[in-house]
Amino acid sequence: MKTIMDPDEARHFAAFLEETSRDLRTQNTAISRQLLELNVSWKDAKYNQFQHLFEEATEDISRFLSQADEYAMRLREKAKRVDRYLDS
């Protein structure tokens, strides 16, 4: 039987997406900590401007990560359904 998707490839991409999301979360947290530490020595309008831009970017990243997690879950579910179809 032929299907539209390869369930192994879908699971592989879901795992890659989850790993990349974890890495991005870790990096974003590290940058946030460093930015807070930098505030001790960098206290001018440019810092405030950069902090605002960083917060906006962090919100965008958070939305992406949420969607990536949801998409990975859907890919895994779809792969299971395709496996069941191929096994029948």
Image (spheres, rainbow, N blue to C red):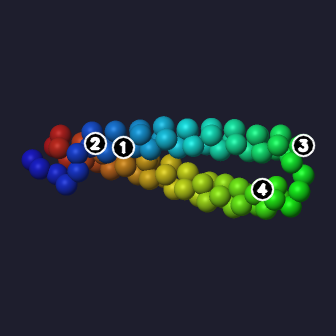
User: Mark 1 belongs to which amino acid?
Assistant: Phe
Q: Residues within 10 Å of mark 3 (few under 14, many from 20)?
A: few
Q: Give the mark nearer the N terminus: 1 vs 4.
A: 1
Q: Earlier in the sequence, mark 2 or mark 3?
A: 2
Does label 2 or label 4 sit earlier along the sequence? 2
**Is 49 in front, or is 61?**
49
In this figure, which residue is indicated by the disc labeled 1?
A: 13
Q: Distance from label 1 to label 2 (Cα)? A: 6 Å
Callout 1 crowding tier (Cα within 10 Å): few <14, some 14–19, many ≥20:
some
Callout 4 environment at 10 Å: few (<14), some (14 to 19), or many (20+)? some
How far apart marks 1 and 4 lie (CA) works out to 33 Å
The amino acid beneath tag 3 is: Val
Residues at discs 1 and 2 in contact (Cβ within 8 Å) = yes
SS for callout 2:
helix
Residue 57, disc: none
Residue 18: image location, x then y, percent: 48, 41
Mark 2: few, some, or many residues within 10 Å (few <14, many ≥20)?
few
Q: Which residue is mark 3?
A: 40
Along the viewing direction, whichever of 36 and 62 lies nearer the viewer: 36
C-beta proximity under 8 Å, tags 2 and 3: no
Q: Which residue is mark 2?
A: 9
Q: Secondary structure at mark 3?
A: loop
Residue plotted at (18% across, 40% down): 87
Question: Tag 3 or tag 1, which sits nearer the N-term?
Answer: 1
Please give the residue where the numbered disc 4 appears in the rendered image.
51
Rendered location of residue 34, percent (x, y): 76, 40
